[in-house]
Amino acid sequence: QVQLVESGGGLVQPGGSLRLSCAASGRTIRPYTVGWFRQAPGKEREFVAAFSWTGGNADYADFVKPRFTISIDSAKATVYLQMNSLKPEDTAVYYCAARLSIAILTTPSRYPYWGQGTQVTVSS
């Protein structure tokens, strides 16, 4: 089992940037795909981006291209989500999740491991 801890959320003005971190522990992260999801009040949780550690590739939801970028630090078993040009509609709780696979899936229910979430608020 892998444990995930997110950090880096906060309040930012429209057009600003934030970098979220997802630190994994418990087991080696390498066989896993790590995804970022978000959930705004009254809305369903939706896919944002994901990175396949074994496949070495990333995928993004259309609505975050090219503003968001995933990066990794293998030594720290951490996945980052760099969010630029933030918009008020990006306001949500952001979660990282993991599943033991090479393929990147975008359905939240396919990910068994979740972090606690971090709040991102974009407002002037």
Image (tube, rainbow, N blue to C red):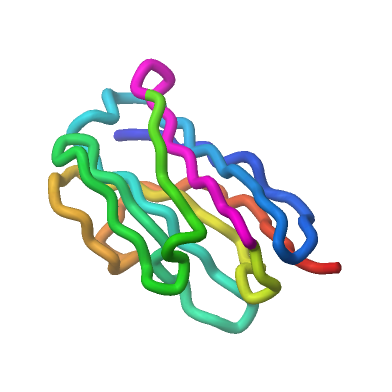
- Please indicate whether residue 50 sits to the left or right of residue 6 in the image: left
Q: Where is residue 116 in the image (x, y as percent from the top left)?
A: 55, 48
Q: Quadrant of the C terminus?
A: bottom right
Does 30 sit left or right of 90 as displayed?
Answer: left
Residue located 28% across and 50% down the image? 58
Residue at 63% x, 61% y is 85
Q: Is residue 82 magenta?
A: yes
Q: Is residue 75 above or below residue 48?
A: above
Q: Where is residue 118 in the image (x, y as percent from the top left)?
A: 63, 51
Query: Looking at the image, is 11 positioned above or below residue 28?
Result: below
Name the side, left or right, on which 15 lies relative to 70. right
Query: Residue at 44% across / 61% down in the picture?
Result: 66
Q: In this view, does 88 lie above or below 119?
A: below
Furthest toward the right, the residue is 124
Tell me the quadrant of the picture where the N terminus can be found: top left
Q: Which residue is drawn at 63% across and 76% down?
A: 89
Location of residue 84 by image quarter: bottom right
x and y percentages locating residue 94 in the rendered image: 55, 57
Asked where in the image residue 13 lies, by quadrant, the reply is: bottom right
Q: Residue 64: give x, y in percent of width and height.
A: 46, 66
Relative depth, front residue between 38 and 11: 11
| Stretch of the chain drawn in magenta | 74-85
- How many numbered marks are there? 0
Residue furthest out toward the top: 75
Magenta-span inclusion, residue 45:
no
Q: Which of 113 and 106 is in front in this view?
A: 106
